[in-house]
């Protein structure tokens, strides 16, 4: 189900409660809205404006212009774009040499293959920008607070595609704690060699690589980062499905 078509939160001053009221009237998706003359709680004047907005949204969705929705849908509701753009989604995670320090590794996962950008090798602004241009949706865990601001500060890059931060989505469906704890709660596995490695350990691994130049430290850091981005996909699948079930219940 492409949930974005069921969403009315892109309309001016329509929040979750008012959206629920619209659904309760049997207006479940955009075409229903356009074909219904009178909707309780929406004035005739606003109905005409909203019709125009929905027609525009349909055009932008047809063009796969995800950036349009990044600006029109509240950040907390951009998870609704997942099913529409999941095949063009980028799962991203960074490592630094200290909290809000310099970036050491960026892991990228398109759902099938991983790419790793490493400081001193291929960690390059133009390369990263070119990668970001390939995708319609960004998915992170705590990226709104950490990864995206650090990338912006480090490279001066503004990420304009919609962004699903799974940390906040997981909180809304009752999953607490960090990524590793949630993975355990959902029985999402990591490979054995990095199961016990934490974010703090990633700093240690990078510092050891820098000082000792022993390849095993870098290899372990890369593997840890790869597991971070790969595991975002099953987590996103679970969290989006659960969130949809919670807010839409049996209506859609």
Image (spheres, helix red, strand yellow):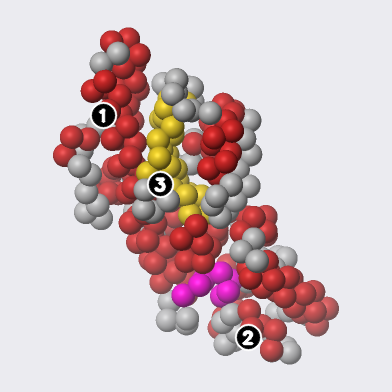
Find disc 2 in the rendering and name its residue.
32
- Mark 1 sits on what residue? 220
Q: CA distance from mark 1 to mark 3?
A: 17 Å
Camera-side mark, 2 or 1 = 1
Horizontal relation, residue 141 to residue 43: left or right: left
Please determine whether, in this image, residue 169 is positioned above or below residue 179: below
Left or right, 90 with respect to 193, comes to: right
Q: Which residue is mark 3?
A: 109
The part of the chain drawn in magenta is 1-7
Secondary structure beneath dot 3 equals strand
What is the C-alpha distance between the residues marked 2 and 1? 52 Å
Residue 224, percent across and down? 29, 35
Q: Residues within 10 Å of mark 3 (few under 14, many from 20)?
A: many
Name the element at disc 1: helix
Whole-angstrom CA distance, mark 3 to mark 2, is 37 Å
Q: Do residues under tags 2 and 1 come within 8 Å of each other at their CB atoms? A: no
Callout 2 crowding tier (Cα within 10 Å): few <14, some 14–19, many ≥20 = few
Label 1 CA crowd tier, 10 Å (few <14, some 14–19, many 20+): some
Query: Of label 3 and label 2, which has the lower sequence position?
Result: 2
Pick the residue in front: 250 or 200.
Answer: 200
């Amino acid at each position: 189900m492409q949930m974005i078509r069921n969403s009315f939160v892109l309309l001016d001053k329509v929040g979750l409660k008012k959206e629920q009221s619209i659904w309760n009237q049997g207006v479940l998706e955009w075409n229903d809205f356009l074909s219904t003359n009178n909707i309780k709680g929406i004035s005739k004047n606003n109905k005409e404006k909203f019709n125009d907005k929905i027609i525009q949204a349909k055009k932008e969705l047809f063009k796969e212009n995800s950036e349009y929705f990044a600006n029109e849908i509240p950040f907390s509701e951009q998870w609704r774009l997942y099913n529409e753009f999941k095949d063009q989604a980028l799962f991203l995670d960074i490592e630094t040499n200290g909290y809000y320090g310099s970036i050491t590794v960026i892991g990228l996962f398109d759902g099938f293959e991983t790419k790793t950008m490493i400081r001193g090798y291929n960690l390059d602004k133009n390369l990263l920008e070119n990668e970001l241009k390939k995708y319609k949706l960004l998915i992170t865990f705590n990226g709104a607070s950490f990864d995206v601001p650090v990338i912006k500060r480090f490279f001066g890059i503004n990420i304009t595609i919609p962004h699903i931060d799974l940390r906040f989505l997981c909180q809304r469906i009752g999953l607490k704690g960090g990524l590793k704890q949630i993975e355990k709660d959902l029985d999402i596995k990591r490979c054995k060699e990095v199961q016990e490695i934490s974010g703090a350990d990633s700093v240690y691994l990078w510092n050891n690589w820098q000082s000792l130049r022993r390849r095993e430290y870098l290899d372990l850091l890369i593997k840890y980062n790869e597991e971070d981005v790969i595991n975002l996909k099953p987590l996103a699948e679970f969290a989006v499905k659960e969130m949809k079930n919670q807010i839409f219940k049996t209506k859609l």
